[in-house]
Image (cartoon, coloured by chain):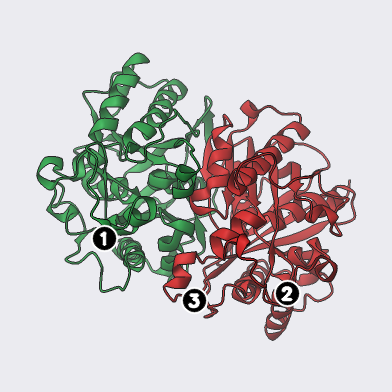
Chain colours: A green, B red
Amino acid sequence: MAVRMGKQTVKLESKPKILSTYTVVGPKEGEGPLKDYFHEILDDDMCQCETFEKAESKIHYSAVQGCIKDANLKESDIDYIFSGDLLNQLFSSSFMARDLCIPFIGMYGACSNMTETLSVAAMAVEAGCANYAIASTSSHFSSAERQFRVPLEMGSQRTPSCQWTVTGAGAMILTNRNVKHRPYVTYITTGKVKDYGITDPNEMGAAMAPAAVDTIKQHFVDTDLKPNYYDLIVTGDLGSIGKKITEELLLEYKIDVRKNYIDCGAEIFDCKKQDTNSGGSGCGCSAAVMGSYIYKKMIKGELKRVLLISTGALLNSISTLQGETIPGIAHAIAIEMDGD
Amino acid sequence: MAVRMGKQTVKLESKPKILSTYTVVGPKEGEGPLKDYFHEILDDDMCQCETFEKAESKIHYSAVQGCIKDANLKESDIDYIFSGDLLNQLFSSSFMARDLCIPFIGMYGACSNMTETLSVAAMAVEAGCANYAIASTSSHFSSAERQFRVPLEMGSQRTPSCQWTVTGAGAMILTNRNVKHRPYVTYITTGKVKDYGITDPNEMGAAMAPAAVDTIKQHFVDTDLKPNYYDLIVTGDLGSIGKKITEELLLEYKIDVRKNYIDCGAEIFDCKKQDTNSGGSGCGCSAAVMGSYIYKKMIKGELKRVLLISTGALLNSISTLQGETIPGIAHAIAIEMDGD
């Protein structure tokens, strides 16, 4: 049974293990600084599909099948798949799940999807509802761009503060089985919706940073831990601008994360060389970085304790047109690895 | 700890109780056969808002606040809210949650949202993660119609098979507290995505019926129960056409539900008088019917055992334009009430 700690955190006594992960990214991500960590790099981000949306769904499916295969399991072993993506009505997840024979729970948390699905999958394992549960998510630059901003064919100039949606997918299997040498989930801190009045959909980092700050602060209040408990604190996709805002706002609460804090959006691209402005975004961003770079470093013993905080901007194209500000959310999940 | 039963079902040992429910519906629903059961009937489905989407979000918020108030709780007592709706990026849920101070998990299962959110909320309670968790959902005729079909201003003629999206919201609080005389969750059967090749978005009942059949059949296989174990088997929003298909398809599996089976979509309107063709739909449909009519009958002791199967069609407007068929999903949740 989980133990509630403070207002927003639970400690999972069963320590659900992350049995396997699988990440698939597009060609641009495959040329970035983390290229040696991804499981699969696509030559063609259309994956022989007719549309961007179908391509994203196919990438998502590959990630799910990859993590099942790497765990030496079959589809029929998986009790639930918790999936989300950025597309209207979860086009990528729903159509991916159509080709699976696994009970499916669709979730939406914008770019916070990876920790959102991981949190609920971990709760299902903790409850005894699942022996094996998959958490998965995807994003695609071209499907996101035309849905949230403008058609690519317009060739619009990008603002300096904007971010580049990662083409990629990540899937992870959580289990209650007593497997050795695998990272496990210890704490879940679920975020509240925060809105600080940002209206410009090119300022995603600024819109999401207050949500990240709120969840990180609450995690430390609830658990009574200090930032140096973690080898690495990792936000999802705030980009370099959002990362700086987060560091500064946390200092106001006397929480100094500057020594051990990275942001997946700032890491996945070489922003100057690859012309991605403030960095990567999209739910594929934290999924691909967590499932490859960070997971592999944990397995190698180079990282023992990681706090992952995926961050989402809960706007849609209609809310922006209706003059609404952009609500943000961030869910944190603590992952640890034993020394053996 | 939950016990896994068969392939898709879990039995919850902690029997999470449904402490309170609250339903808000529009004027048309308030003139239908269930008018005496709803908690709140709106005079104006715009709720003094500028847009249909904002109105839907406001109705959703009212349902959530109503169920908290009716349970004599405060917002700060609630550990999680699991919410979903039909709008792109969960406009209704996300903007509703912005005005709450409750950790928020967004979910999408189209019209299956009520049992989807209830399932996961029940798992969170079972895991010990939540003492109080809300499951909520909403839909609005006017926001759904222009998003999924055509602008209302076109005044298009409706097909005989089409359904009328319910304007309404429902919220329920689940708890592990030992409250008396409340229905509780016993089994959860989570559905798989099923696609039988329907392409016409006016044929929602036909698209979702195979998913309902698959989940109902699996529920009885997994639990070894018979249909007559339940006083009532209730599908979400198949409408009269989808209901008939479901009855017939179940008979092929030798499962006869004809004596104790109703569909929320067929119940909520007087289809002939109210000109709603095949009946109601939208995630507000099963939420409003379960949270009012069925819940109140359970509290009164008129119903002891209910199997609720909300059904969703996982299409979006782009998937239809891209020539895709319509995948369906259905999640079942068994709710029981002690005789005391």
Q: Residues within 10 Å of mark 3 (few under 14, many from 20)?
A: some
Q: Nearer the viewer, residue A325 or A221?
A: A325
> Would you identify the image quadrant in which residue A314 lies?
top left
Q: Residue at x 75, y 63 (%)?
A: B264
Please, which chain is the residue tagged with disc 1 on? A
From the image, state whether disc 3 or disc 2 is nearer to you.
3
The alpha-carbon separation of the residues under discs 3 and 2 comes to: 20 Å
Q: In the image, B96: left or right of B183?
A: left
Q: Nearer the viewer, residue A322 or B8?
A: A322
The alpha-carbon separation of the residues under discs 1 and 2 comes to: 45 Å
Q: Provide the residue designation for mark 3.
A: B325
Please, which chain is the residue tagged with disc 2 on? B
- Check disc 3 and report its element: helix, strand or loop: loop
Above-or-below relation of A299 to B112: above
Q: Amino acid at mark 2?
A: Lys
Residue A153: which disc?
A: 1
Q: Provide the residue designation for mark 2.
A: B243
Residue A192: image location, x then y, percent: 50, 33
Please, which chain is the residue tagged with disc 3 on? B
